[in-house]
Image (tube, helix red, strand yellow):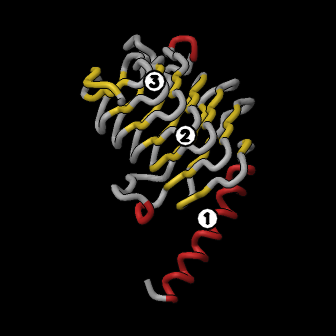
Amino acid sequence: MNIFLRIINKIRMLYWQVMGYGLARMHGVVIGKGCKFYGLPIISRAKNSHIVIGDRVVLCSDSRYTALGVNHPVILRTLREGAELNIGDDSGLSGSSICAAVNITIGKKSLIGANVLLFDTDFHAKSPVNRRYCREMEKIATKPLVVEDNVFIGANSIITKGVNIGCNSIVGAGSVVVKAVAESKIVAGNPAKEIGNVS
């Protein structure tokens, strides 16, 4: 890389750091020290909800800085009053979407691959009557989602409401996880099934 491109890259990185922290704080996010922004995330926080980002978390929203590229920026969103979204220290996300209606927790040192979706709600009511426009929250199914420490979720996976992924586990790329994953297991597929152990 020539000197001109290195200078441009340093300026870009400085801009993202300043703007990333500023954007997070503007939205009332509690953010730790040493976080890195590659591109700017999309943040949306419902009234009286909480988003907490730990120390040294990496949020990659720019395809130039991750091998597979990203389809869109990292999205961090709470949907209801009282919702909680927590990302533990030293975790990394690339173009991931996290939508919390009640509670989503990502543990420490977890890797969330490119374009992964995590959500703790069905978004719409189960009943077909007025499903599209229903805003009665008690009719929309929700259940907390937990990703424990040191979990690796492969690109383009979907993690649905009520799932708990045990520490050290791996979710294969493109998987749809609809039930709990025990500690130190490898799962893959749609729906995801256990295919091995983390040695």
Give the residue at x 68% y 38%. 52
Q: Is residue 1 above or below residue 91?
A: below
Observer-side mark, 3 or 1, equals: 3
Image side of residue 22 versus residue 168, left or right? right
Check disc 3 and report its element: helix, strand or loop. Answer: strand
In front of the other: 137 or 179: 179
Q: Earlier in the sequence, mark 3 or mark 1?
A: 1
Q: CA distance from mark 3 to mark 1?
A: 31 Å
Q: Which mark is residue 16?
A: 1
Residue 116: give x, y in percent of width and height: 40, 40
Image side of residue 171 versus residue 11, left or right? left
Residue pointed to by mark 3 = 165
Q: Is residue 85 above or below residue 181?
A: below
Disc 3 residue type (three-letter)? Ile
Specify the quadrant that holds the C terminus: top left
Q: Which mark is residue 109?
A: 2
- Categorize mark 3 by other alpha carbons within 10 Å: few (<14), some (14-19), many (20+): many
On the question of residue 97 being in view, the answer is yes
